[in-house]
Image: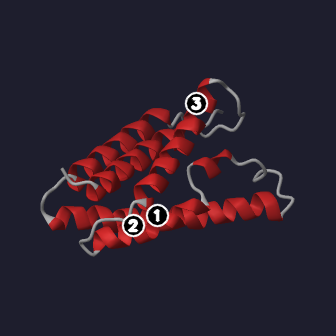
Amino acid sequence: MLPPDLRWPFLIAGLSIGILLATAGRSARPGPVRAVAAFAFAFQFTAGIVGSILLFLWLGTEHRAAWRNENLLLLNPLAFALLPGWWRVLRGRAPRRFAPRMAGLAVLLGAFALFSKILATFAQENLHWILLLLPIHLALALVLLRRRNPA
């Protein structure tokens, strides 16, 4: 028996969450923006923890299933670098210039993960995770960029 195909449900969930975050992040009122910042802080903290564990399993153990885990492109320790930017947004201030750049790097890593699936470069079956997490990373990067450069 094959596992269920999660690509469509994960894509719909990722797009829905991403659109909700991007829309709330454009608000002129502080409440929705702070809610996005609180979500983003928890999301990036979790991504950093999971990424650190994946990196440790890859480099620090002989765990075969964790070796070359492509989910490191979506969940990686670099997410910790975004926490100060989200903290500033949570406190009602603009993030420093570094934060949108790091968020852009997260989007680029996720786009590379997607591109690698299109080219069938890597063998790991994680397209559903890419379809869930890439729209969230993109929305959060757009929110940080908007908070950095309000129009």
Per the model, the C-alpha gap separating discs 1 and 2 is 5 Å
- Specify whether 58 is left or right of 92: right
Could you tell me which residue is drawn at 45 percent across and 69 percent down? 83
At mark 2, the secondary structure is: helix
**Residue at the extreme top of the image, as rendered:** 119
Could you tell me which residue is drawn at 37 percent across and 38 percent down? 12
**Compared with residue 12, is residue 85 higher up or lower down, i.e. above or below?**
below
At mark 3, the secondary structure is: helix
Per the model, the C-alpha gap separating discs 3 and 1 is 24 Å
Could you tell me which residue is drawn at 56 percent across and 49 percent down? 74
**Residue at the extreme bottom of the image, as rendered:** 91
Lower sequence index among marks 3 and 1: 1
Which of the 4 image quadrants contains residue 119?
A: top right
At mark 1, the secondary structure is: helix
In the image, residue 148 lies at what x, y percent?
Answer: 30, 58
Q: Say few, some or many: other residues with alpha carbon within 10 Å of mark 2 (under 14 / 14 to 19 / 20 or more).
A: many
Lower sequence index among marks 3 and 2: 2
Q: Would you say the residues marked 1 and 2 are in contact, meaning their CB atoms lie under 8 Å apart?
A: yes
What mark, if any, has residue 85 been given in the picture?
2
What mark, if any, has residue 116 been given in the picture?
none
**Circle 3 residue:** 115
Foreground mark, 3 or 1, reads 1
**Circle 1 residue:** 82
In the image, residue 97 lies at what x, y percent?
Answer: 39, 60
